[in-house]
Amino acid sequence: MIDFGYGLTPSATLKIENVQNPRFEALHELEPDVVKCIACGSCTASCSAGCFTEMSLRRVILSLQRGREKETLPMLRHCMLCGKCQLVCPRGINTRHLILSIGKVYGLNEEDGR
Amino acid sequence: MIYQGKQRIWSEYQKEIPTDHWFYVRSCIRQSFFPASEKTFLEILRDRLGKDIYETPSHTTCGGIAYHSEAIPQETMMTIIARQFALMTEAGYENYVCSCITSFGLYSEVIEDWREFPELEAKIRENLWKATKREFKIPTYLAHASDLVYKFRNEIAEQAKFRLVNQQTGKPLRVVEHIGCHYAKMFPSKGVGGAEYPYVLAGMVESWGGEVIDYPERRHCCGFGFRQYLVKANRGYSVSNTHKKFESMEPFEPDMIITNCPGCPYFLDRWQYVIAEQTGKTYGKDGYGIPVFTYEEVAGLVLGYDPWDLGLQTHQVAVEPLLDKMGIPYNPEDKYKGVDGKQLQRPEFPMNIKCC
C-alpha cells in the first residue's frame, strides 16, 4: 500500500435498510401513521415548546427511524401536548397520539418528565 | 403521469442550440489530461459534419481555476473573459462554444452578473479598454461543446462504425454518465435538461446504442471541487467523494463512464488508481478499473478513430477491456508510440490495478 499523504475518510452514509430497529417497528405497528411523516417541519415550526427548548417532533421522528433514541427521547419531556402540531400537519398525523405512543413503546417514565 | 403532460413538462427543459458558425475556446487542462479530445471535436464538426467553427491562438485561460481557488478577484476574472469575448467579436462570430465546464459556468455567471448589474459591465469594459484597447459584444448564444455533440448525436450515429454494444453478448453497454457540476447546477436553464434531468450525455449514450445506469450517487460531485484537491490537506475529501461514487455505482456493473467536464474524467480515472493502491479494491472486472472517457473520445470511438490517435493511452485505467467489448481493433504494440511512430518511454505500472 502506498502512503500518498492523504486518504479516504470513512463514509458517514447510513443505510436505513441495514439498521435493525425493533422498537421503531413496534412503534410503527402501534402507530402506522409514523411513516407518513415527510419531515416538512411544520410541527417544529408551530411548536409552543420549540421556541424555548430543544423539542422538535420532526427530529424525534427522523432520529427514532435512525435508531438514535438516547439523544431523542429527552426532547419529548418538553412537549405540553398542546396539539398545535396536529393542526398544521399536512399529512394529517395524530401527533399527540403519536407522542403518547412513543412514550409507551420506548418506556418514557417519571425521570423523563412524564 | 399522462404522456402528453410529460412531454409538456419536458419541453421546459429543452435548449435551443444553433447549428453552425461557432467561435471555439479550448480548456486549459484538458489539452494535457486528454490531449486528443478537443482535436477530435474540431475534426468531427469540421470534417464529418461540415460546420464552420473558428478558434484563435490568442485565446487564454478564462481564469476559472484561479477564481474558484480565490487566487484572483472577480473583476480580474471578468476582464479576462471580456477579452475572450473581444476576440470573438473581432473574428466576426456571435455564437460562443467552450470546451470546459468551469469556463461554461463562469461565462454564464459573468453574463448573468452583467445583466443584473450593468454598472459592473461598464466598469469591465473600461478595464479592458485601458488594458488592451479592445471592445466586445456579449455572445448571442453560449454553449458547451457537449451541447453541440448532443445536437449532432444522431448525425454521428448515422456515420457510426461501432456502437456502444457488447459484441460478445449483443447487449447494450452499461454506461455511467457523469455531468460536470458547473454545467447546469448553477444555471439550470443553460443546460440540456436543466439541473434536474440533465440529458446531454444520456442522449448521446442512447443514440449510440448504450444503456444509461441510474444509481444513487449519479449526481454527486466527481470529487475535484477545486480547493478539495488543490490544497493537499483537503485532498482526502476529494478521493473520499470519488470513492463514494464508485461504491454507489459498483453494484450496477458499469462497462464505462462518460463525462463532459475537464476535471471529472481526470479524477474518476486517476483516483481509481489511488483507491486501488490504498485499499486494494478495483471496480472493474478481473482487477481492472472502470474506463473513463470524455464525450469526444466516445464519439471518436463510435466513428472508428484509432484508439491511440484518440490519446486513450494517457488514461490511468486501461481502456482495452472496453475496446474488446465494442469490437474495436487496436494494436497493443502501437500503444506507446508517438505520432512519428517512434516508441515512447513505457510508463511504470501500478501494483493493484491492471493496466494491460
Image (tube, grey):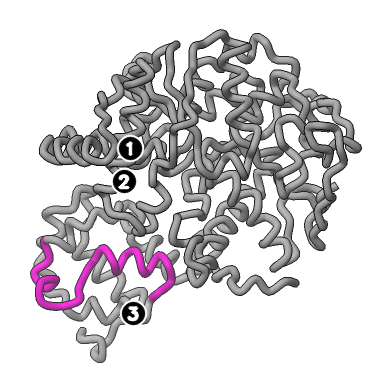
Query: Residue A39 appears at what percent x and percent y?
Result: 28, 56
Q: Mark 2 points at which residue?
A: B77
Q: What element carries label 3?
A: loop
Q: How far apart are marks 3 and 2 (CA)?
A: 48 Å
The quadrant of the picture occupied by the C terminus of chain A is bottom left
- Let me know if marks 3 and 1 both belong to one chain: no
Left or right of residue B157, residue A35 in this image: left
Q: Position of residue B347 (x, y in %)?
A: 81, 53
Magenta stretch: residue A52 in it?
Answer: yes
Give the magenta range.
A46-68
Distance between the alpha carbons at the discs numbered 3 and 1? 52 Å
| Residue beneath the point at 43% across and 18% down | B22
x, y (%) of residue B178? 53, 40
Vertical placement of B296 versus B238: above or below? above
The one of A23 and B315 positioned closer to us in this rendering: B315
Q: Is residue B208 left or right of residue A19?
A: right
| Residue at position x 42%, y 32% in the image | B197
Q: Residues within 10 Å of mark 1 (few under 14, many from 20)?
A: many
Vertical side of B66 occupied by B233: above or below: below
Where residue A71 is drawn, which disc sits there? 3
